[in-house]
Amino acid sequence: MSRPAPAIGWVAFSPGDRKLHTLTYCLATPSLVLMRPSLFFMLLCVFAWQALAAHAAEPDPKNRVVVIENVKLDYAQVLNVEPVYQTLRATRIEEQCEAEQIAPVAAAPAVDDEGRINRMVDSVKEMFSRRPELPSAPVAVPPTSTRRNCRVVEVPREFRRPIAFDVDYVYKGTKYRSRLPEDPGNRLRIRVSVTPYIPDAIVAPPR
């Protein structure tokens, strides 16, 4: 009894329409193939079916359209401009001085015996003379001296500077808001792009 020839198969692409085809050839008679199917033939059919399903799910690259972007420049009306500030904190070293008054210290008079005798003689003369007393001159108050009490302290400082501007503007009845590095003034120059919406389309820049 003759043995059936093995089944041979392969997968190929057709360059014309790029569709997947499975070409299977069998050298045995159909009755022998049905009675004893080859394992290689079964695996080949399974792989070919999966590859065909995956290829059918992917879009054909030749159907993708390259859309050229239509661009023009126009002006929008500015509605409001709000500056965005950045707060900077720093520490500065300063010298603070306060004036302090110093009271003078009066020196105590020296007491001696000769001074006591002179005062006693003067008092006796006053008792016998009885002359009217002249008003005494006001005693001069010694001036007070001042000195500066200085110390070095750290004084915190805060600085605010604008770093950007939030601009509200309107174009064709639609309001927009953008953050810009400078104040645009009353009008804002904008870039308008008009492109038809096509899913999976490739948008090319204007020429």
Image (cartoon, rainbow, N blue to C red):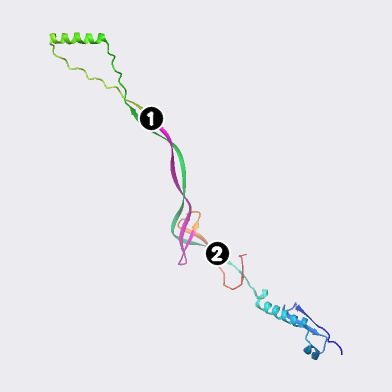
In the image, 63: left or right of 21? left
Quickly name the residue at label 2. 72
Check disc 1 and give the amino acid type: Arg
Residue at (47, 44) in percent of width and height: 90
Identity of the residue furthest to the bottom in this view? 31
Residue 175 in magenta stretch: yes
Residue 79: x and y, percent? 43, 60
Q: Is residue 108 magenta?
A: no
Give the x, y percent position of residue 177: 47, 61
Residue type at tag 2: Lys
Q: Residue at x 44, y 56 (%)?
A: 82
Q: In the structure shown, which secondary structural element does the residue marked by tag 2 occupy?
A: strand
Locate residue 95: give its quadrant: top left
Answer above or below: position of 2 versus 153. below
177 lies left or right of 200: left
Nearer mark to the viewer, of 2 and 1: 1
Other residues around mark 1 within 10 Å, as few (<14) / some (14–19) / many (≥20): few
Residue bearing mark 1 = 148
Give the x, y percent position of residue 36.
79, 87
Position of 5 with respect to 108 (left or right) is: right
User: Does residue 19 appear to the left or right of 112 in the view shown?
Assistant: right
Q: Residue at x 22, y 8 (%)?
A: 117
Considering only vertical position in the picture, is 66 above or below 146?
below
Q: Position of residue 70 (x, y in %)?
A: 57, 67
Report helix, strand or loop for mark 1: strand
Of marks 2 and 1, which one's residue comes earlier in the chain? 2
Report, in whole angstroms, how far the alpha carbon at label 2 lies from the one at label 1. Answer: 72 Å
Magenta range is 149-178
Question: Number of numbered discs present?
Answer: 2
